[in-house]
Image (cartoon, helix red, strand yellow):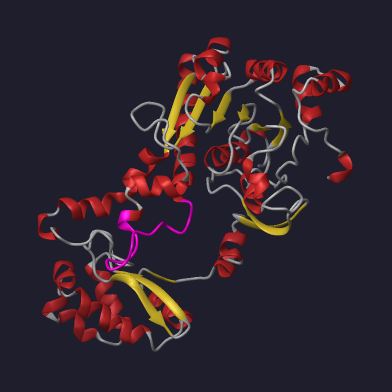
Amino acid sequence: MGGAAARPLEGITVLDLGHIYQAPYCGFLLAMAGATVIKIEPPSGEPLRRRTKVAGGSVPMAMLNSNKLGLSLDLKNAEGREVFLRLVDRADVVIENFAPGAMDRLGLGHAALRARNPRLIYAAASGYGRTGPDRDRLAMDLTVQAAAGIMHTTGFADGPPTKAGPTVCDFLGGTHLYGALMTALFARERTGEGAYVEVAMQDAAYATLASAIGMHFGREREGVPPRTGNRHAGLAMAPYNVYPAVDGWIAIIVVTEHHWSRLVEAMGRPELASDPRFASNPERVRHMEVVDALIGEWSATLTRAELEALTRKHGVPAAPVRTLEEVLEDPGMHERGMLRWVDHPEVGRVVLPATPLRIAGAEVPEFAPSPFLNQHEAAVLEGMLGLDASAREALRAAGALGPRWDDSRA
């Protein structure tokens, strides 16, 4: 970002103990906003490093850990814990998504850390929360999708419950964790006191079910199956579906009556606007099968590009269903700086994301590749704690530090 004033989290130090997706994404957002984020991993590295044999890294690892410093500490080792505590003394934020109670068993829970540093924001993420009957239930994105009702409402009525394609619960949790700790940082500006904040993936996912819950409580929808395919989750809007094209599919949604009149003009069927079966959204919902058939017959004669041009011209909300390859090459996202081709030292030439959070006057930050395991040991431990090479080697010999980083690998 252009200058200190444009980096809202400049001067904030974050200890990122996150693994896989949830907490690391929160740490990524903090780093891209200017915070100094120190990714702390065990000596063997976090689990995401072990998902591929490519130089110990992975593309998701590269995506979620740009602009972080890498440090490897063994928190099960007494000397490793002491080094961590010394870092806590100088930190503003600790984020973690270990199983509930794991940090307490190490003597590093939020009460212990905040007693040591009262200004600390301790941000914890989990699947089902740190309290309640499900706190110790094992949680991964798939299982939370199942428990949260997402799978029950995804798929087609005559098919099985289906997971969402993306890893929605992990990233909902990570985004909400960012919001929680930023709120706590704002409160600290007023009170001078730190805080403990937590986010449960299941809690964060609940609001996404709004349309399906609306159908559940709608009396006229009793007995309607909860899975609606590509139609509106509450079956309360029409048209709202994915329609065939010559070369794929296009998603079309009509939100207002103006959209409907513009759509039938684009279709070359203006007479449909005055057809009593389609005169209002409730009427179109009652005749949903007919509406979808009419649109599908029209769309199937045109390419995605032709359909996109027509719907844009007439002001109809629509978008072609694009392949992953097409998304990676999206010219708008590259022009805005959201996506960039990066020659990454571990995973090669890949497309990596910037932050979706934009602040007026702040440039999208340059990428610093995700760190190798323990890459910034010297910068962190000598720079923050004054531990020179001999002191660090003594800690390594005691099992407190991870493997020595070789600068020649960068």
For the record, the magenta segment spans 152-167
Residue 343 x, y percent position in the rendering: 76, 56
Residue 97 x, y percent position in the rendering: 52, 33
In magenta stretch: residue 163: yes
Determine whether, in the image, residue 31 is placed left or right of residue 158. Answer: right
In the rendered image, which quarter contains the C terminus?
top right
Determine whether, in the image, residue 182 is placed left or right of residue 27. Answer: left
In magenta stretch: residue 228: no
Q: Nearer the viewer, residue 298 or 197?
A: 197
Determine whether, in the image, residue 78 is placed left or right of residue 316. Answer: right
Res. 302 image quadrant: bottom left
Q: Residue at x 57, y 25 (%)?
A: 93
Q: Residue at x 54, y 19 (%)?
A: 105
Q: What secondary structure predominates along the stretch shown in magenta? A: loop
Q: Nearer the viewer, residue 249 or 282?
A: 249
Res. 228 image quadrant: bottom left
Residue 58 x, y percent position in the rendering: 67, 51
Above or below, 380 against 337 in this view is: above
Residue 104 x, y percent position in the rendering: 52, 19
Q: Residue at x 20, y 74 (%)?
A: 288
In the rendered image, which quarter contains the N terminus?
top right
Task: Please give the count of numbered marks on the rendered protein.
Answer: 0
What residue occupies the far top of the structure in this picture? 115
